[in-house]
């Protein structure tokens, strides 16, 4: 008998009708002879509604209490799914993060899974039940609830799949899988049948909706993942280590992000330690830096630019201005109207010419490139926000992603 | 330093403004030098909304899962109250029933408190925090959530007060205390300053809104209770063992219940064991019997009448009809348009004439009495539902309850 872990996001359990649909899918997997563990998120906008409530009663809601509050959303949905299953009847039991043995550590609101003791999950499975687990939450050493951050239900699902040595972790969501590009932007974007973890990580990190930590975790424990629609019965995208060699030698998809801001610190003295002086206070303030570019130095001075999420711009400027004064930089400016586009594919590292083709295609379309950054399996360009969609379409066409070759 | 347990019902925490009001009350008690534990119910109609959700996904929601679902309502409100307190700032921590050490046993949906291990509550109090406890819930031996039934937050509060040996248990609600009669029915009804537990039990059981089990529990552990308004700063009603002798020698209040049905089994053979034959199947079906009257027998036959809550009528008739056939009774009929009125007072048992005065007053007002039942501190008449309000007013006047003598 095989063991599968399902995960259903908030849009898949948003109301009674959708919950019944999820329940049928779970019951069907069980009827096919699988043991099933299903991780569920909070219904629809529940988490946002609870956050709003918190801000109505408190100017700065305390982390521990906010986690107690938010964790209730997943308890509600997992109880509802379990009772709907029992009603079919299909024997089921709901478990909180604590009951499922998910130990969390770190900071409230962004806990990480320390370990999983799946004793109760295993016991319930062996007694013939489907196990519905509240996603997004664990229990601390002090026996307090701690949430795993936005998208934390993906983490719960993958971590449980790893701890249970499940045969697969199936992520059901409101899209049918991973596409060569955002179908809302590129009309003939094509669903990918397979991806490897690193490609998925790049596509997720630059626009797709999966929690990147969960993909790293799946790779680390070699958990095969399926991303598929909870509404349609169509094959999704399989993510695993061994992708067939013949699909690897080309660009797999185009990702984008509209939410980029660039900060430039002008005329910085070009001496050892200066980058640390600038980036340490930003890290301490919790600002994630994406791309860093340091221009060639002139007379021992340099311009240092970096990109961040636009949401962090105000915080970052507040941190960076006094630092710039202290190191006698000429000034600080920003551009908050940027986006980024990336071409992603494991095959790129074995074949030359991808970068040149990307730059040429963008130039032909009059898209100006502000910054460039690359990884082994990705080439990213920062461009003006209002050209992002057109750039995605240009690249999708240029690399013939609409064709399943 | 004294230790008080507060309890706030659903209407007292129904929205952000009301939560802030509760928070100010708690902070004031702490500023006065008290250690404070506050038990909170779910916000407003949350429990009903969750029940509705359950019935949308399931025809017959399973007990264990329903309890997981309903228990979230109290977790939400206790987290909100704790974060609002921390915001003032007044150091506070929310605890679930499990974290507060409340062990429950029995049936899902109607658990009873088996024991309380208040170790964590004590530890948090000693570290200077206010402790907010989710009412209505405990944890079973198997580490599952179990709710304590409607009004279960009162039980939580009293049980915690007993376990902590608190100096008082203060029940804050949307009424200013216990009145001589329902102020919506009797204009000059008067708030009572003091009651003893038994009087409170009779007044609660026959109409007032406190959970009777909580009053019995308070009496058993001799926990002084205050019932007061969470909205106004006016003295409430104190409930405790030693009520001054001079207030005991009269009727304390008039209670009523509009929700009564009577079932009569006609011409039952009058032989030993017949009552058990009738009432055992009702008990097994979970129907609570209130008053039983067996008319004088004629030729070894008797009419047997009993009253139940109107909500149980359909279930009771389903049980009783086949029983009546089996014992060759002549038939079964019912009256579902009844109510009951009671006069309550510890003093009644020491002084004669209360019953006569009650019957005379009702007769003068043309109120027909269907059945009569008495306890040591209560006399109850079953009357037609449409005469209940008038009967309450007549008795309130007849016993001069509007006068504070």
Image: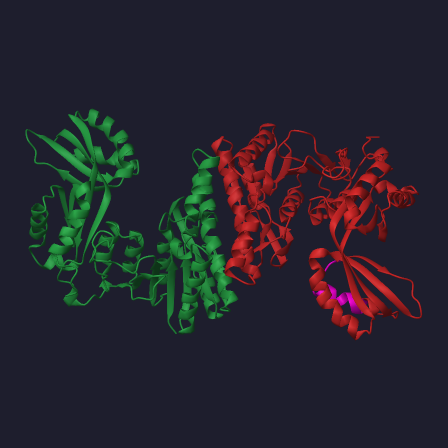
Chain colours: A green, B red
Relative to A137, A364 lies left or right: left
Foreground residue, B223 or B276?
B276
Give the main secondary structure of the magenta stretch.
Answer: helix
Residue B101 shown left or right of residue A193 in the figure: right
Q: Nearer the viewer, residue B387 or B179?
A: B387
Task: Say above or below: B225 vs A121.
Answer: above
Q: How many marks?
A: 0
Name the spot of residue A304 as percent of width and height, x first. 15, 34
Q: Quadrant of the N terminus of chain B?
A: top right
- Quadrant hosting residue A277: top left
Coordinates of residue A390 in the picture (x, y in percent): 16, 47
Looking at the picture, does residue A348 appear above or below residue B275?
above
Say whether residue A271 is visible.
Answer: no
Image x and y of residue B173, in percent: 64, 38
Residue B265 higher or lower than B226, as above or below: below
A296 left or right, relative to B235: left
Residue B25 location, quadrant: top right
Please state the horizontal and vertical placement of residue A73, each as a whole percent of the image.
Answer: 46, 50
Q: Can residue A355 be found in the magenta stretch?
A: no
Q: Which residues are magenta?
A: B276-289
- Taking the image as drawn, is residue B119 in sight? yes
Q: Which quadrant, please, contains the C terminus of chain B?
A: top right
- Residue B308 shown left or right of residue A369 in the figure: right
């Amino acid at each position: 008998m095989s063991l599968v872990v399902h995960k259903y996001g908030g849009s898949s359990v948003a109301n009674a009708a959708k919950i019944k649909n999820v329940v049928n899918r779970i019951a069907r997997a069980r009827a096919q002879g699988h043991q099933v563990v299903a991780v569920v998120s909070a219904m629809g906008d529940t988490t946002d509604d609870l956050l709003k409530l918190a801000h109505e009663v408190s100017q700065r809601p305390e982390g521990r209490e906010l986690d107690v509050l938010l964790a209730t959303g997943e308890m509600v949905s997992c109880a509802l799914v379990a009772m709907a299953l029992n009603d079919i009847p299909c024997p089921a039991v709901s478990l909180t993060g604590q009951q499922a043995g998910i130990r969390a550590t770190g900071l409230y609101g962004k806990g990480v899974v320390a370990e999983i003791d799946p004793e109760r999950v295993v016991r319930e499975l062996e007694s013939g039940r489907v196990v519905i687990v509240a996603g997004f939450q664990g229990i601390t050493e002090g026996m307090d609830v701690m949430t795993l951050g936005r998208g934390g239900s993906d983490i719960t699902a993958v971590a449980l799949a790893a701890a249970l040595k499940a045969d697969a972790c199936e992520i059901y969501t409101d899209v049918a899988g991973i596409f060569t590009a955002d179908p809302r932007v590129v009309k003939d974007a094509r669903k990918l049948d397979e991806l490897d973890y690193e490609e998925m990580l790049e596509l997720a990190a630059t626009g797709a909706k999966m929690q990147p930590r969960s993909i790293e975790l799946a790779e680390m424990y070699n958990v095969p993942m399926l991303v598929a629609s909870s509404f349609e019965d169509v094959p999704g995208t399989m993510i695993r280590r061994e992708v067939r060699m013949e699909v690897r030698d080309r660009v797999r998809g185009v990702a984008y992000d509209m939410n980029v801001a660039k900060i430039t610190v002008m005329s910085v003295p070009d001496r050892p330690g200066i980058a640390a002086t600038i980036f340490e206070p930003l890290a301490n303030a919790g600002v994630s830096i994406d791309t860093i570019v340091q221009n060639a130095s002139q007379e021992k001075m340099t311009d240092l630019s970096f990109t961040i999420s636009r949401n962090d711009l105000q915080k970052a400027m507040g941190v960076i201005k006094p630092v710039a004064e202290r190191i006698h930089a000429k000034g600080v400016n920003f551009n908050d109207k940027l986006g980024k586009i990336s071409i992603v594919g494991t095959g790129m590292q074995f074949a030359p010419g991808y970068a040149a083709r990307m730059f040429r295609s963008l130039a032909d379309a009059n898209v100006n490139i502000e910054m460039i950054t690359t990884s082994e399996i990705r080439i990213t360009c920062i461009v003006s926000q209002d050209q992002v969609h057109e750039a995605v379409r240009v690249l999708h066409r240029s690399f013939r992603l609409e064709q399943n070759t």
